[in-house]
Image (spheres, rainbow, N blue to C red):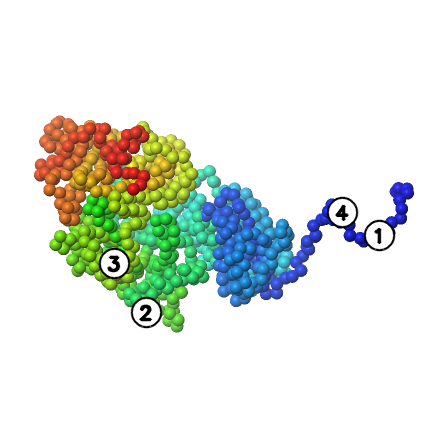
Amino acid sequence: MVKGLPHIENCDKFCEGCVFGKHPRSSFPKEASYRAKKPLELIHTDICGPITPNSLGKHRYFITFVDDFSRRTWVYFLKEKSEAFAVFKKFKVLVEKLNGNYIKAVRSNRGGEYISKEFEYFCEEHGIRRFLTAPYSPQQNGVAERKNRTILDMVRSMLKSKNMPKEYWAEAVQCVVYLQNRCPTASLENMTPQEAWCGVKPAVSHLKVFGSVAYAHSLDQRRTKLDDKSKKLIFIGYDERSKAYKLIDPATNKVHISRDVLVNEEAVWCWNSMEEKSHDVENEVQIIASSTSTNTTMQADPSSSSSSSDDDARTPRTRTLQDLYEATSELHLVCLLADAENITFEEAVQEKKWHQAMNEEMNAIVKNETWELATLPKVHKPIGVKWVYKKKLNAQGEVERYKARLVAKGYKQKVGIDYEEVFAPIARMETIRLLISLAAQNKWNIYQMDVKSAFLNGVLEEEVYIEQPPGYIKEGQEEKVLKLKKALNGLKQAPRAWNTLIDTYFKKHGFVQCPYEHALYVKVCHDDIMFVALYVDDMIFMGNNDDMIEKFKMKMSKEFEMTDLGLMSYFLGLEVKQDKSGIFVSQESYAKDVLKRFKMNDCNPVCTPIESGTKLSRYDEGKAVDETQYRSLVGCLRYLMCTRPDIAYGVGLVSRYMEEPKMSHWKAIKRILRYVKGTLSHGLFYSHTDEFDLLGYTDNDWCGDIDDRKSTAGFVFYMGDTAFTWVSKKQPIVTLSTCEAEYVAASSCVCHALWLRKLLKEMNFARDKPTEIRVDNKSAIELAKNPVHHERSKHIDVRFHFIREHVKDGDVELTHVASRDQVADIFTKPLGAELFNRFKKLLGMSAGA
């Protein structure tokens, strides 16, 4: 090829220059040098993510565990990588219980989640060897890396083939893993991972195409004669524990578990039309937020109005109370579980804190002699039970206590057989605010206690049998049931049984039940007085004698197992700050949770909840919005009104459009959230004042509703300088003049004043002089005093004229107030920022104590 090149012998010397200039990476073996001989000898694991967008359960990652011997795969979903260690512990307990072997080695990369001190210590403690990849060498973790790549490839294809939104990626991942475990693999000869793992050939005849349109059968017990016998949903996977399919309603993101399903694998869901409304099928569960394994239950990846319309043309109610009980039977349990943690019994027993909570509940049940083991009579059917788990939080949102409750499935009870009466009173929120106002005026402290396992104390009058609870079944007597001697959480009559017991106890110890507020008890001993307000198992109490209060605490703790919470600081979501200057009540933490829940925590604040001049109509044109989400947000805002009278009108306005809400209504409700964002710390401040008497304001916005021309009435009552009760409500009739509208509004206000006067009298705070109610319409005041303007008032219903009698008797006195000082105006119409903030301050609201 060339001339003059000298002959050079082959040189094997090390050349440093060549190393610096040409050093390649060492090749990776194409096949593993080692294969496990038994299940769990080696586990491959890797995390995939972050994935955009978040899943329905707000997850961004998934973690897989692959058994080297069987190639069986498990998947869990994570919100943050830091959750990997907790998930691995759950996985370890699960697979070791299922298989009988122990995990001997784990292969992973060097991600921070895998090389943390707690992970390393855990593996050392349990004798688990670690095989870590070299830095930047994911090829050494090829089994897990390839598994995640294959999963994502299939997920993309499955979502695309059915035009499904990307938010459903977690459901697709679960389905892919389920299928892969039942499909042949090159790593095994004539065997699927599922068979290699458990020794049983898997069935595949039930497999369906992911994302197909599915029809779930509606049970006869949950529909009327003419209702559809099927519900149109989307197939998203399999529920192994139930031997059923998982279906999802995209309108509500609720998962339905049903075995009676027909799947149209050729059809594609029309995502531009989300008008289907959900109803019950065989089993309906809310999408949960906990990490789930494909080896256990296959759950989807997580995550009436005071001013509502009162249309005259509406059909009168013809359903009996019994009909309503039966129609909403299962909602009883749904409400009970609303704040529960999304965790199953199988998962709970693996964690010490939940296991301890269950033991505490069982100890309380045994101590109370709640039941006895019995043989089930032929005429009875046992009621099922389940464990419900909840983290009890303090005002800062921190976990204060882990609670486990054994709950009876009360929706299966039959009226007349398993229960009779169910009503139990609870304290009204306005009564609680009245007590706070009285305490601030008299400079009393308000204390708080709650009864542990309160419902377990109530004595049952009916004969009720339940199944033995999971995890506590009597060995050798599995066929027997439990006969209840006392109430249990979840039973329809449990609240009433507990209330009957505590009512008897209070009356026995000198308390008098207020006839105008049945959850309020008063005890008077010479010059000493004490009040107790009861809200199920929570109670607040106050009085002018500290010794009397301490004796009450001691007696209650002796009779019941109590938790003394000291000064009232966090009650039913209300944050209460007590000091020498007064008492400040707010719901800042709850408001933050609402903003976060509806993804408005980063919104831009506005200065008023409803823009001045806003007129909404049920006939507004525009795109329809999700009714379920709209109603849910209205409900959240209505509870926020407990300490926020400034949003009462706005919430009442948007509450009128719960049925078929449009985008204009949704924008209005979002504006309220924007206002809340800018006033998170605002609440009511109650303090001692020189003028402490019952005072009311009432106002009306004539013909404010453009749909039916009905007026919006509002009133507010004070004791001192701060409001404690208020109402914003559309009137039930169409009025012909401002005089008539104000007169009708004043009648409603007088009704409330009479109730408050009677309540205060029972509390030993009787009002000797007439209660002043301030009105800004002189004609309405004259009409209340005398039957003047006959031609313009002769048509007014007699029920509104009772106001004259109470004005004459000296119970109330209507006085005139200038419109610029009419505080109740804030409850009747949207106001400009200047006037709104002025009235808001007059209500006693501030940014903090």
The residue sitting at the bottom extreme is: 476
Q: Secondary structure at mark 1?
A: loop
Q: Secondary structure at mark 4?
A: helix
Q: Nearer the viewer, mark 2 or mark 4?
A: 4
Q: Nearer the viewer, residue 120 or 715?
A: 120
Q: Which residue is mark 3?
A: 498
- Bin the neighbour count of mark 4 within 10 Å (Cα to Cα): few under 14, some 14-19, many 20 and up: few
At x 28% / y 59%, what residue is drawn? 562
In the image, 283: left or right of 447? Answer: right
Q: Which residue is mark 4?
A: 17
In the image, 497: left or right of 620? Answer: left
Q: Nearer the viewer, residue 741 or 546?
A: 546
At x 28% / y 35%, what residue is drawn? 840
Q: Amino acid at mark 1?
A: Asn
Q: Which of the marked residues, 1 or 2, is nearer the chain's N terminus?
A: 1
User: x and y percent of residue 403 in the render?
Assistant: 36, 58
